[in-house]
Amino acid sequence: MTLKAIKSFISMFDIGPRNTRVGIETFATTVNHQFALGDHQTVASLITAIDKIPYQTGGTQITTALAYAATNSFNTGGRRLADKILILVTDGRSIKPSHDKLNCVTTYNNLENKTTNNFKNNGENNN
């Protein structure tokens, strides 16, 4: 059901090299990189790739996934003025909900600051 919703969601955007770019990471105990921003240039290509994403199980570590995204996911394929959508797909509820609730806010803020600064200051590296 989740992948169907993701396909429906991305179909609303104008995907392309000069338009919106989408990346997907899946996670449970560990993060698995599925594809980077800019790997797929059309909605059809994205949907084909999404259909190939395997279901991952384990202990859900939301903070780990957000930290991975902050460090890795926005560094490849993002063009400075393009809309960038990163989708994190989980296998379920966090194994440490109270821990993740506290840490997710900090991690999200760090992610937002990092990606904003990355694309403001280093846009020439993200064509």
Image: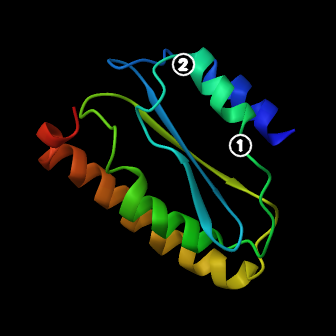
Residue at the (65%, 75%) spot, across then down: 101
Q: Please count the marks in the image.
A: 2
Disc 2 marks which residue?
A: 13
Work out how far the residue at label 1 is from the one at label 2, CA to CA, in angstroms.
20 Å
Label whose residue precedes the other's in the sequence (1 or 2): 2
Q: Residues within 10 Å of mark 1 (few under 14, many from 20)?
A: some
- What is the x, y in percent for residue 70? 40, 62
Q: Amino acid at mark 2?
A: Phe
Q: Is residue 58 visible?
A: yes
Looking at the rendered structure, the secondary structure element under dot 2 is: loop
In the image: residue 82, left or right of residue 48: left
- What is the x, y in percent for residue 26? 65, 55
Between label 1 and label 2, give the one nearer the viewer. 1
Residue 45 vertical position relative to residue 68 in the rendered view, above or below: above
Residue at the (82%, 62%) spot, across then down: 92
Q: Is residue 12 visible?
A: no
Query: Which disc number belongs to residue 53?
Result: 1
- Residue 80 sits in which quadrant? top left
Q: Give 70 or 49, whichever is nearer the viewer.
A: 49
Residue at the (31%, 59%) spot, across then down: 113
Residue at the (37%, 67%) spot, across then down: 110
Residue 123 vertical position relative to residue 111 in the rendered view, above or below: above
In the image: residue 101, left or right of residue 123: right
Q: Quadrant of the N terminus?
A: top right
